[in-house]
Image (tube, rainbow, N blue to C red):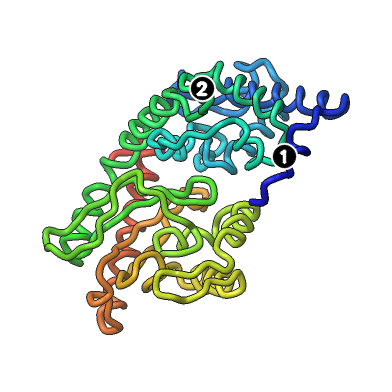
Amino acid sequence: MTALNARTRERPEADGDQVTWAAGTQLLARAVSLILYLRERDQPVTVSELAGALQIPVNTAYRLVRTLELGGLVDRSHRPYVSLGLRFMDLGLAKQRQVTRELAAALQIPVNTAYRLVRTLELGGLVDRSHRPYVSLGLRFMDLGLAKQRQVTRELAAVAQPVLEALTADTGETSLLLMPTGARAICILAVEPSRAIRLSYQPGHVLPLYAGASGKVMLPWVSEQLLETALAQGDGLILAGGKRLTAGALKADLKTIRACGHCVTHDELDAGASAVAAPVFTRSGQIFASVSVAGPTSGFTEERQPALIARVVAAASEIARGLSKSWSGETA
């Protein structure tokens, strides 16, 4: 991102800008209140309930939710319900610190505006300024991340863990369950084989949607805005195997994935590694997660690939059925 001219950044805002940024700061304060309310409730709620709790119009609540969803800070995969987003599981582990002037340059906003935003977030515990002049994510993010992790574990582990364990036992490869969070994906569950040479991913590990089967298999079914973001992120990047990724090639891949219902990749995120993935959908047909097996490319031969695809697709379907029963209150 191009940094702004220092003189431009430090220039006082015009009266109209002050009004605009005052409204923006109020919107940010409402967003913080929305996030903290979701943490307090510790369960999915409707947008109407959020509007009532925050004492704001329902259409304002919808706009806030949609904006936060783009950043992975809220989850709407179980519409009409809203819950904390998976992004908090990743943000809670972040350690980077920056000065406010750097934040202003990165966001392309005046420095005094950045200070107001930081103070607003500090009130909610979402940023920490105890080591001035540095700013970092606040400890509240750790709490939010742990809360989301507990919620996901309650919802998924009982259904998905046995399926992944069976998948690893059958294939001898690492089995993964990932979920989309904004324009990225986060590892929720991982089961590794006992053999020495294996691909290792830990829960909380963040992957792109534009490369690697585990993330890419979900990309055809995300919102148009998230799709465009992912295409822009990946366009022109050099993959682990040396191939240059283009938006056009990625769009062609997505058409194939949508048509066949699975994704196979080689040497995209890690050189010498391959993966096979399939999507997991909610009862309403929305993308919810992906199931994949990943490991050294030597184990993903053309002769073996059809069997791996069939096994992964079957595992994804089994998890989808189990979650559907869980969400509807049925017993297996």
Q: Residues within 10 Å of mark 2 (few under 14, many from 20)?
A: few
The residue positioned farthest toward the front in the image shown: 7
Residue at 57% from the left image edge and 69% from the top image edge: 236
Q: Which residue is mark 2?
A: 132
Q: Is residue 217 above or below residue 97?
A: below
Across and down, in percent, residue 210 comes to 50, 62
In which image quadrant can residue 76 be found? Answer: top right
Real-space Cα separation, disc 1 to disc 2, in angstroms: 21 Å
Viewer-side residue, 14 vs 149: 14
The residue positioned farthest toward the right in the image shown: 15
Q: Is residue 177 above or below residue 86?
A: below
Q: Which residue is mark 1?
A: 6
In which image quadrant can residue 262 be found? Answer: bottom left
- Residue 112 visible at all: yes
Q: Is residue 126 above or below residue 179?
A: above
| Left or right of residue 175, residue 76 in this image | right
In which image quadrant can residue 47 be found? Answer: top right
Across and down, in percent, residue 251 comes to 59, 70
Viewer-side residue, 133 vs 49: 133
Residue at 25% from the left image edge and 61% from the top image edge: 199
Q: Amino acid at mark 1?
A: Ala
